[in-house]
Image: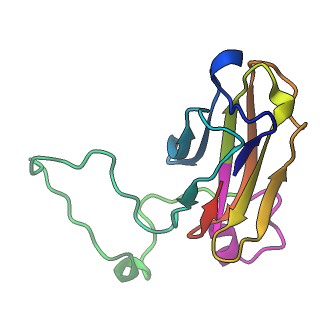
Amino acid sequence: LIVDSEDDGLCCQYGQGSYRLYIIVNGKEVVLVRGDGIYTEEEITQFQLPDLNAPFPSARPSQWPSIRPTLSLDPTVLTSFPSLSPSADVDFVGTESMAPSEVNQITNVRIEVLMDKYPLEVGYTIRESSNNAVVVQVPRGSFHVEYGIEIRSYELLASQEYEF
C-alpha cells in the first residue's frame, strides 16, 4: 500500500514519480511490483516472493537443442563424493542466531521510490496477505528529497504473499 496525503500520487503536476519493488537473484534485478505513480490517495498491489531455493526459471528459454548437451544428475547421488568445484563458506551477517533453514527463507526486498516535488506526502506499508499483519511501515513524512530516489531494503520471508 503506497499512500499520498494530497490525493495526487507521485505524478503529473508536481513531477513524474514512480516506484518499484524488486529482489536480486543471481546478480540480476527481478522486479515484483512496478508503479507509474499515477494514483490518488493510495494504491495496493499484491506480490509473492519466490522460494529462492527452488529452481528459478530462465528469462529466455533456449529455442534450439544444444550442440553440446550436458548431463544433469540428481545432487543426492553425489553426496558421498567430494565436490569437483568446492565453494567458499559464506558468513551471513546478522543471522547468527537463525537455523540454516531459516536463513534460506529470508529474502532481501528493495523498494525504490522516485519522488515528486512533495516527498513528505508519501508513505508505504507492506502487509502479509494471509493475515493482514503489517511487516513494514514507513509513515508519511519519512521522505525528504524532492525529485530524488529513495531506496530502502527489508528482509521478508520467501514464498509468502504480500500487499504493497
State which quadrant residue 105 falls in. bottom right
56 vs 12, left or right, is left
Q: Where is residue 128 in the image (x, y as percent from the top left)?
A: 68, 68
**Image position, residue 35 (x, y; %):** 56, 38
| Nearer-the-camera pick, 147 or 3 | 3
> Is residue 151 in view?
yes
- Number of numbered markers: 0
Viewer-closest of 160 and 107: 160
Q: Is 16 on the left or on the right of 76, as rendered?
A: right
Left or right? Give the position of 70 relative to 44. left
Would residue 95 appear left or right of 10 to someone viewing this image? right
Residue at (61%, 56%) from the top-left corner? 88
Residue displayed at 83% across by 22% down: 145
**95 within the magenta span:** yes
- Residue 91 seen in the current view: no
Is 93 magenta? The answer is yes
- Above or below, comparing residue 23 to residue 150 in the picture: below
Q: Residue furthest right?
A: 141
Q: What stretch is highlighted in magenta?
A: 91-109
* Residue shown at 72% from the left, 42% from the top: 41
What residue is drawn where x is 73% and y is 22%?
116
Residue 131 vertical position relative to residue 47 in the rendered view, above or below: below
Q: 37 or 81, which lies in front? A: 37
What percent of the width, then of the height, locates residue 164? 66, 53
Q: In which quarter of the image is residue 140?
A: top right
Is the image coloured rainbow, by chain, by secondary structure, or in one colour?
rainbow
* Percent coordinates x, y for residue 57 in the rendering: 35, 57
